[in-house]
Amino acid sequence: MLGAMSRMSCFGVLLRTSVVLYLFLKGSQAQCAPCTNFKASTTATEINIEVHVNCTVSTGSTSVFSNSTTATLSGLAPGSIHRVHVLCNDIQQVDCCNNFTTKPGVVGNLNVIGTTTSSVSLSWTQPKGDNSFYRVEGTGVSMNTTETSTTISGLTAGVQYNFTVTTVAGDKTTVGEGNTTATFTNPKQPVNIVATGPGTSQLNVTWTLPGGRVDQYTVNTSNAALSYASSQTTQTTMASFTGLQSGRVYEVTVTAVAGHFRNQSATGQLATVPNPPGPLNITERTTSSLAVQWKTPDLMTGVPGISYNISYYSTGTGASSQSTASLRYNLLSLSSGTFYTITVITVGPQDLGSAPVNTSGYTLPKPVVSLTASPLSTSSVKLRWTDPVGVKSYYSYRVQYSNATGPVGEKTVNTSFADVPGLEPGTGYTFTVTTVAAAGSNGLPELTSSYTQPKAVSNLVVKDLNTTAIKLSWSQQDDHQPTYSYLVTVSKKGSMVAKVSTTVESYTFTHLQPGDSYTFSVVTVVQRVKSDSVETSSYTKPGVVTNIATTGTTTTMNVTWDAPVGQVDSYTVTIHNDNVMEDSHTVSNDSLELVFQNLKPGKVYVVRVVTNSGPLTEASLNVTNATYPNPPGTQKVENQTTGSINISWARPLDMDLGQYWFSVFYLGQHNLTEHNWILLENLQSGTLYNITVVTVGPLDYQSTAVTTANYTRPRSVSGLTEAGITPTNVTLVWDQPENKAGYSFKVEVTYPNGSLLIAVTVNNTKKIVTGLQSGSNYTFTVTTLTKDGTMATPVKVSYYTRPYPISGLLAPTVNTTGVRLTWTKPPQYQSGYTYRIQTEGCVSTPTNHTVTGEEAVIPELTPGTNCTFRVSVKAQGGIEGGTVSIFQYTEPESVQPSISNNGSTNTMVVSWAAPPGNVGQYVVHLNSTDQVFTPVWLNSNQQTHTFIYLSAGREYTAVVTTISGPFNETSGPVTTATQPNPPGPIGILEKTTSSITVEWGEAPLMANTTFSYLVKYLSTQRDSKTVTTTNTSQTLPSLSSGTPYNVSVVSVGVLGFHSEEVWSSSVITRPESVQSLRAVTAEVNLTLTWSTPVGHKPGYSYRVTWTNSTGLIISNRTTVVENLPVNGLVPGSPYNFTVTTQTDDGTEGAPVSTSSCTNASPVSNLKCASPDDPNAKLSLSWTKPKGLHQGFQITAKETIQLPQGQVHNKTIGDCNPACGHTVPDLKHYTDYTLTVTTLGCGKTSTVQSLTCKTGITVPPIPADFESLVSVTAKDHNSFSVQLTPSLLDSTNGPIKHYGVLVTSDINNVDQSNSSQYLVKTYQDWEAGSTTAYLATVKDNTNNSRRRKRAGNIDIYIGDKTSWKGYTNGQLKAKREYSYAIVLFTEMVVEQNGLLNVGSSLVMITPFNSNSLYLPQDPGVTSVVVGVTLGVFVILSIITAGFIIYWRRQNKKASSDIQIHSMSRTVVVRVEDYEAYYKKQRADSNCGFAEEFEDLKLVGTAQAKTSALAMENKSKNRYNNVLPYDSSRVKLSIHGSPFDDYINSNYIPGYNSRKEFIAAQGPLPGTVNEFWRMIWEKNVQTLVMLTRCNEQGRVKCEEYYPSETKHFENITVTTTSEIPLEDWTIRDFDVKNVKTVETRSVRHFHFTAWPDHGVPETTELLINFRHLVREHMDQYSRHSPTVVHCSAGVGRTGTFIAIDRLIFQIERESMVDVYGTIHDLRMHRPLMVQTEEQYVFLNQCVMDIIRSRTGTNVDLIYQNTAALTIYENVEPRKDTSKNGYHNA
């Protein structure tokens, strides 16, 4: 107690002390002044103050005394505020106070407790001491917190951050030391992993980092199937993997790494580009298709999911695109004869496309139409045709022609006609015309034939004639052939007298009338082709006169004759000389004499007398005589010599030369000559002779004589010459070789004009002639004379007397090559004088010139040279006088200088050639408009001089002077200019599609002269163009777009001189933009197409860029074609496309853009569920489609849609939560076609459809059900119920089972729950445990066909049969029974054999309202009468019931005959067929009739459009037997689209669906088509079942020849024919004249099918079938067999059906006559046309089966109704009234 009180006392003291101290301090604080001259620093536990010496520093309980300048207060609390008191007792007496705060402590355990991509969470522990909050700082971060943890957000992912946490003291200002830590934020997950520009063996993987940064990326790629994995580390957002396999999908992940943090992307599926397919080959061409084939891409065999995209286009059409998974594709619906470019790319995973592989080719053109040929001449044929369907402008036609020996030639034309020349005359030719679209693209050839005209005969003449006959003859031409004949015609006055045909080249017409005029014509004929006609005319001969006589004088001739036998009109008498008629006279028939006057003497005349009868004449024999000649004229001597005399005489008057001779007589000699002169030789000179001459005419008639006398000449003088000549005298001398007595000499002197000067006769041989004039010409003649003055031949000589010399000679110079000489005439000058001038010194050799005047210019002298001239006078005879001389210089020649700048801008060269002659010196002068140069003197051996330091682009003129002796000569001026300086470099300012603007630097040093610039620009496609300008820039207009131009600029100075060219090569204008840009879209790709830009050039390319809806560029490609497949797109997404034209150098045109959406992707895994529900519905589900979509369009409609049916149409949005839709309110057990279409921003997807059947539910009970059920029979322990089939209503599903509930206690049956009795059995009923039970159940699943045919349904109650766990036990007599009908659409049976009612779909009718009472058992009656009567009554009832029952049972299948019946078949086993046959034959074939009636409408709803076309109606034999479009046989088209029609159908056989062709019998107009079908379908077996004429009616045209026949391009030759009793077998050779191919066809002609009936036995037709089938199996396994009758349905259907039924029996042991005919009628109407034919087929089947089982070995069935069961003459009443008769 005391301790406690002591402690409390101490505490009180302490408390009081503290209060006092506090009050003291507070008072002192309030009184303490602030310290102003002291500095202080703090730590967490200390305060350091700079003070004076001897100061006390205190705070709180802490105090220190400082004897230095620093005082430290320690042991303080961190982060606290301290009041420090400084008290100094020095001189200054300091007493002051300040508050100081210690630094707060450092936080501890600073940790990063969490990071994200944008935040970091920190935590720390609180430091000691006081603090107010914490400051957290880092890069870009500063925040305060009072907590010991914080989260910094808004950071950048993947960045390393340094965070510092500092404590802020209680004063909220003082900051302590920080604690720092570092960390990274998490990197973001890489996204958008894509492959950019994937290759076939590499992937360039790129991705996007959504934000922040990373240190690096780790990229992994793998393919498990290839056991491939690879990894790369990169700091960029791209990684490249190489060495991959093409067309594979690789899994790629990208992990972002920042510090030690990693963030892996989602796995991306990236694919390599597939390799391109192998080379493309066009393997097959038609007019509308091209089959393209390629090989699997390299290194991609077995790669899954590979397909191929095929795009193709032709000029002017857009591109089409198709896809396929095979290595072959057939491009269909193409234009004929068209050039297509085909591109195939491999499409691999993710729809990546390979590099394209291209090929191109033409489709085949169609053949020409309506080809005809006609003879044009002997050597040519005219062909005409119609252009083929779809003709193109570039088509040509190849015309080939051949004759019997083979091909002759061919030609190509561009027109629809052709003249074929150069053919042989009269020759048959076959012509084919083939359409040619391009090399290797030929249409089918069309063929025709024609003969050329034979040549017309030549040399048609009347070879012989008389008064009554004329013989014609002519010559064969070189084309003659043995098949030629001649048609010879004779006519008179326009009327034909006779016409004959002959094969020889002559013919004689006899019995003609004498003197008549006849016209004859001859024509060459070959194969009914005639040559041109050749004609001639002639007359018969008249009679001839006799006994002609003639007498004559020198000028007359008398003619007499005797008249001929017969009558003539007149005589024409002619007289001829030398075959020229001299005269002609016609006299009357009573004149027999005529005198011809005025004839010429000495002429031979031929006289002829011609008889004239009408226009005809006949000449007599010729009579010849002559007139007498006239005598010669007077003689004269023409010439005399010393030994001869030549005399002549005048020719006789009026006589022709050559018609007479002369006889000359002298000295007893006789000479005969035809000339009018004669030379008498070997005579003596100077002798006298006598000469006589007479004329000798024709027939040696002579004239009177003429005589004359003459001398011969003496000998002439010899050696006549001059002995001396002076200007006035000439002395002559001569000799005489023979000096006879009486000779003298006559001397004559004459002037040149012939006038006589002197004439004197001398007897000696010398004479001096004097008194002559100087320089004159004289003729001197000396003649020897005989005694009578007969002169010898004169001898002449001529001499000139000498002239006198000239005087006064002068020589002035004329020019460089000539000197003029003048002088005075000499004395006695004569007009004939000439002057000879000799020149020396200035010529190479001395020359002489002769002149006639007194002056002369001597030419051709050497210029600049001293000359010597000598002149002498010369008389005409060449005699000269004296010579005079003189000297003179010629002038020098001027030069022809040339001046050239030699391409220089500052030099000029003047040069010249040395002139002719001599030059002493040259002087050269040069000047210009602004410069003068000193003349330059040069010696004679210098001919050039160069002037330097000239100005560029200036004009200069030069002249050169030559100096020689006293003369000089200056040349003409020559002018040229220095070259201008070139401009500066060329720059391109601007380019457009049609212009280029260029600039260049100005030419230097050209300021003081005139110049311009010549800009030249040229392209490789056009001539160059130029433009002149004075500017230094120029726009070149009107250029072609996208074209390279070479541009040059030159300076053009004076005189048009050009500087060096400055070039800029290959400047290309901008190309035009592409045209018609459009996109053909698909799901994950599209094809861009465009038209070439205007002015497209071969070097163009196109840069194609496309972006997605956000503007992100997806790809940028370049192509050189006008289309580009774009692959790898997202379905249903919008894209923008830009196409820019580029030239070779990258010059771009304006871009053209378009936008398009890819097609929406279809849904996949479309499924449906059909629950069995009272509300019928279908539940659809599908997998979400690829890409984007905007919802789905769902439709549902009944598969067999009635007009009033409803269509469910619904549009739904996205797949939320799953893709699906339920279609409610449908019909039960109904097929519905459901479609789902994906909607997108562009085209919807392809429609995905499937057919589903709705579920079933409990069957309906008709309201009138009681009327549909009746009791048909009853017994004491049983009864039968008959159901009308309509009770089994399948509206809610097919009634699979039906049964009967039976009760004998209707009042205790709970009809509201009738289903409880379905599990009650007969045994339960007998045991009394139930009032009703299920008596029987019938299976209805296999009886639909039987029910349809049999009618009502009978059910027997109490027949002791069993079904599952139920027994149909006997009923008890004398009770009332009620029944209910049970219908099941679905039944479930438990293992105990009883129904599971809950799982079954069942409906029960109410029990019948009128109970059924069963009578007493008759076996228990004890009264005999009663028994007898009862038995009788019962037997009567049973008999009546049996009859009714038997008749009804005949209408349904017997229970012991196994018939498998479906809607289109009635199949009967072979072992059951006889029973079936007998049943159906009963009651007059009632069963077969019912079956046949069932077939009446089979197939009739099918289209027959082609058969009903107007153009084809005439090709049908009967208008109710028309082929269905679906199965008709189509022929090739030759021009008209209707060319492919023929009335025939493909019919299925047992072995193939096109084993037979059923055809009508050919009409006259369809025989050609029939044989064309035989050829085109390669038919080798042909069956004919009708005769051509039956009962007077044409059933079929006889289309087969007896030998050979032509059917257009088909030639058919019958090579054999074997007629048998019931059929005929023929063999044909069928030849295609175009291809020259020949095939064999066998013709089976069944002739035992009588009119209006069938074969007498089934054996005939069955055996005939075996015969045909044997040939078919050998030759027609791969081609159809043609069967025809008349209409091609009745007998034809019967034959084909028998063939099929025999196969059924042999191979299946089953028979289905009904199903066989049903199938035939689905392919051609009315096959097996009549009920009788149907019965006959069954008879055949029965006999075949019996023959197999041995009951009918002979296989003969006698048809007792053979004349009535098959063919009717008139149509049946139930057929159309069109005149059709059964086949």
Image (cartoon, grey):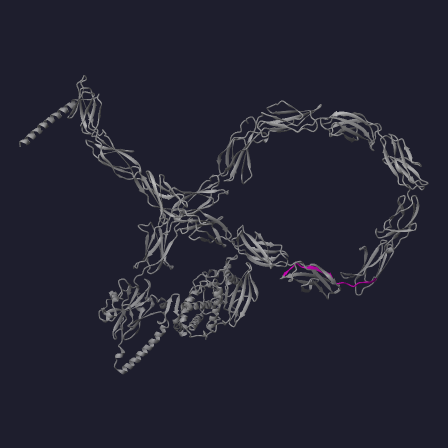
Answer left or right for 651 relative to 1014.
Answer: right
Percent across and percent down for residue 609 are: 81, 60
Percent across and percent down for residue 963 are: 69, 24
Q: Is residue 787 visible?
A: yes
Q: Is residue 339 visible?
A: no
Look at the image and give the residue range highlighted in magenta.
529-547
Answer left or right for 131 relative to 995.
Answer: left
Answer left or right for 1492 relative to 835.
Answer: left
Q: Nearer the viewer, residue 225 or 1579?
A: 225
Q: Nearer the viewer, residue 954 or 92?
A: 92
Question: Going by the picture, which residue comes out furthest to the front?
Answer: 227
Position of 543 relative to 352 (above/below): below
Q: Is residue 540 magenta?
A: yes
Question: Going by the picture, which residue comes out furthest to the top?
Answer: 91
Q: Is residue 41 magenta?
A: no
Percent across and percent down for residue 377 are: 63, 56
